[in-house]
Image (tube, rainbow, N blue to C red):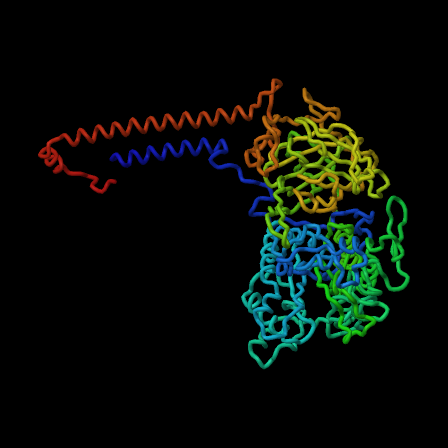
Amino acid sequence: MNKNKLIAKLMSVFVAVVVTITSYAGYFAPAKDNSVYAADKKATIRINSDAWTAVDGLGRTLTSYEEAKDSVDRTVGIFYWTWHYSFANLKPLNINEIINEYPDAKNNYNHVVWRKNRNVQNFWNEPLFGYYRSDDKYVLRKHAELLADAGVDVMIFDCTNGDDSDNTKENRRRTWPDAYCALFETLEEAKVDGVNVPKVAFMLPFAASNGAKQMLNILYEDIYSQGKYKDLWFYWDGKPMIMAHINALDYNNPAEREIMDFFTFKKNDSSYFSGDTFNMWGWASVYPQPKYGEIGADGRPEQMTVGVAQNANIVTRSLTAMNGNNVMGRGQSVGNYSYSYTYKGEKITVSSETENAHYYGINFQQQFDYAIKNDPDFLFITGWNEWIMGRYDVWPPVAAVGTQNAVKNAFPDQYNDEYSRDIEPSAGELKDYYYYQLVSNIRKYKGMANVVPQMSAAAINMKELSSWKNVTSTYDHYTDSTYDRDKDGFRGTHYTNDTMRNDIVHTKFAYDNDNVYFYVETEDNLTSYTDKAWMRLLIDTDESGISPNWEGFEYIINRVSPDSEHCMLEKSKGVDSSGKWIWENVGKVDYKVSGKVLQIAVPRSMLGLTGNKIDFNFKWSDNMQEDGNILDFYSNGDVAPGGRFMFIATTDDVKDVPAHREESSNHTSNNSLNKPSVSKPSNGGSSNTGNQGNKPSQSDDNNGNQSGNDIGVNKEDKNGLNWVLLNDCIIVASIFIVSICLIFIMVVIAIAIRKKNVAVESIPADVLKEESTVENPSDTES
């Protein structure tokens, strides 16, 4: 064997030894993340908002499974605007604020306030996410989740303002490609993160116009013929659906015939006052809405509409501006209409005569009631996020509608809080009221799945994560819900957000005779418990709203930062006159952090859950920026579930399950549970995701993975010595010593070989020649 083979074999031995030791220690090949939230498994996350509940700011509780029918095959589309970048060079002007300050400016085109505000874009009010551009992916991701959670199936884009000249460039611009590309990308990303995103479709001009013809060719060329984002297309009758007039195309033109054969066309009706129409679909109508499309054998129509408000004069039954007379605003109804709900044990009835009737969506609810009664296959809802409008000296033109219906200083499609038609949450007085009204009614229309899990009975030992192995009461949550934001809005505005810190992906809950247990898992290891607004748990034990509460929650944990051993449970005392939340101390409860997992044990007696039925709702929140503002849940950090939604925890049959007891322990709290083993940080907490330096001691590996049979255990003797850490240190030291020894041996061998080579080189050439004549039995040995 020559020197090369010897060295190769020595190297093989060295590598084998190092790999064997380090693999055993878990450093060379760390354990695979067994969480279902590993990156390659995100697409398997399944979230069904039917298992959630909410109470909105008006005290209305979402429709429950018991109130709705079982799920049926129905489709919900919503009108969606992608044009909020084309006009972003203009400064936003809040018309609601202007009219509140200058009411005499309503129908005065030359009022001084208008002269002061030129080159502006009118908004009926400010959106919750600011005066955003439609290519702001932070906002688009929020929209994707909100619409998915509401049960919306398809977003239908407004491209109705075509240019009838032969200006292809302008008509392409009016399909808003920069915005829809950003939206398509965001929807694809959201799908990977577990969001059941709506599909997409377009609505083109309300006639067989040249603009409609050009837009059909443009959209087919730019998207459909290339198969771009095909998995996002909305299909109806087996083909991608488009709301447009098919007779804008020429069947004798082969290219246009290809387009005609490609889509399912639905002609869009422009009128608010049509009767039942079999060969068109609508987008908005006054009550009672017409039935569109073919009537099925069961008597149900193919399509109907539901609108928040309509720029229609209900007396003259004609088109008008939103600041005109007899307009069908948010708080208006046709005839004597009202609806009721129960809050704080009382029946509340609202109608157009109710103070602030526009908060309650009287128009919206009357239309929804009628549509649900007629049960169409497809429901078109107007709308989500139009927000903007022009201002005209006179509109509609006198020649078209006459003097009685023409409006001076006209705002055609939107105006203020009362006379506007968007559902997207507002930063103004309407807040998120219309969003939960939308959710509740979609549940009534489409039905619901019975997916609320029964709460598991389990005696949880918080030192053993394996205690949760058989707990089936679980909920998943989307990852990456809050994108980093650093984006211009409309002129003069810029928005930033980097508040995503602990990305909540999974939660479990269970009970025994003494306690209710909560488990929450994050995408990465949890940050330090000293961080501000760290991993708060909010609990609703009285859905009636009778008990003092903050936005429906009677209890909160971690509003006050925890110490190294306990977190604080507080009870709501309601809000003060300024709307500030007020809490009082109930007591300390035990918690434990293990890598990505936080566990909390709350004595049932502290929550008043001592009876034979355990029912409550809960949600997690991390990194809230504005304490006491429920709308913060939409914008900052992470919450599970989103917005006002809450996970439902219920059990119909409370079992007798004794709580876990340690046979001997020097670490017990008042409720006999083991306190978490925690190392206090040496410096202040960080708000940055992934900060691993200041947190309770981890029982899992550096990636938060569970390894071996000692899942979730910090092995400590009575003196506090951590044997797991000591064992790891010994293994690392062993690897280092063995490596040094092997390297030393290899150096010695290399020196010896070098000396032998030198000796060989000193032998006379004639001697070497004689030796070379000796028969070599293995000339081919390498």
Q: Is residue 521 above or below residue 64?
A: above
Write the residue at 73% across / 50% down. Answer: 427
The answer to which quarter of the image holds residue 155 is bottom right
**Left or right relative to 190: residue 559:** right
Q: Is residue 69 visible?
A: no
Q: Is residue 596 above or below residue 173?
A: above
Q: Is residue 216 visible?
A: yes
For the residue pair 102 and 580, the one nearer the viewer reads as: 102
Write the residue at 22% across / 42% down. Answer: 780
Looking at this view, name the residue that lies furthest to the top: 719
Q: Is residue 382 above or below residue 36?
A: below
Q: Is residue 384 above or below residue 687?
A: below
Residue 279, image x, y percentages:
73, 75
The answer to which quarter of the image holds residue 282 is bottom right
Residue 654, image x, y percentages:
80, 37
Looking at this view, name the residue that lies furthest to the bottom: 252
Please state, as top left, top right, bottom left or bottom right, where the N terminus lies in the image: top left
For the residue pair 145 and 732, the one nearer the viewer reads as: 145
Residue 429, image x, y percentages:
78, 50
Please state, as top left, top right, bottom left or bottom right, where the C terminus lies in the image: top left
Write the residue at 70% across / 23% down. Answer: 668
For the residue pair 238 and 209, the one nearer the viewer reads as: 209
**Left or right relative to 345: residue 399:** left
Residue 193, image x, y percentages:
61, 49
